[in-house]
Amino acid sequence: MHRAYRQGVALVVFAPLVLGACATKGYVRKQVAAQAVITDSALVAERNARTAADQEHSTAIAQLRTDLDAMRKDFGAKIAQVEDGLRFALPVTFGFNEDGIREENKAALTRFATVAQKYYPGSTITVEGFADPAGTARYNLELSRRRAENVRGFLTTQGMDGSALRVVGMGETRLVVNGATHDEPGAEQNRRVVFVIENAGTAPSGIAMATP
């Protein structure tokens, strides 16, 4: 009698333990399943975000190349990637012994300012000024610097950050046409400015130095 009673009590005690274990296992399974759903959703969201970012990146590069092509077509710009950055050689030239910006060059400078601000925000841009070989080397160095300074000033009127524009007078170095001065053929090409985008700034990777 006592033995049967004890067995009955044991069964009564054991039953809740079994039920509790089953309930715990069921809860764990539900939690694991729920976590799997969350993980899968996160992976899908990440994949979609990356795909959207890749598409946006590709679109930005395509737009940049279109704008650079337009600069080549409209203004005869020469754009190339070099060791120190991206070099823009625009046909912005000066009269003999002059440092003022010509009216016909303002459209090209305005377009450059637009492209630079759109694709290279935060970049350091060097404005290199040049002179033809007439006069002394010291005078030409100063004249070329004044030309670069005036171009820098114009670019700031187009919204560019003056603190990001560095000015360098190159004097009569890197002549396009050797020895050409005054009104000789090619002399104006020696009296010019060149832009060098020296770093990527905040431009997305691949856009900073993308060229057609």
Image (cartoon, rainbow, N blue to C red):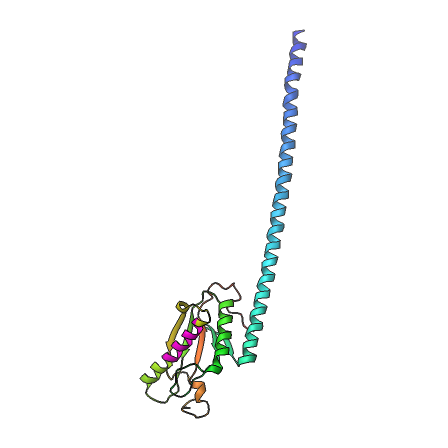
Judge by depth and name the residue closer to the eye, 11 or 35: 35
Residue 4 occupies quadrant: top right
Left or right: 41, with 127 as reference point: right
Left or right: 14, with 147 as reference point: right
For the stretch drawn in magenta, the main secondary structure is helix
Coordinates of residue 176 in the picture (x, y in percent): 45, 85
Q: Is residue 107 visible?
A: yes
Residue 83 occupies quadrant: bottom left
Q: Is residue 142 magenta?
A: no
Residue placed at 49% from the left, 70% from the top?
116
The quadrant of the picture occupied by the N terminus is top right
Residue 162 occupies quadrant: bottom left
The span shown in magenta is: 145-156
Coordinates of residue 123 in the picture (x, y in percent): 45, 67
Judge by depth and name the residue closer to the eye, 14 or 75: 75
Q: Is residue 84 visible?
A: no
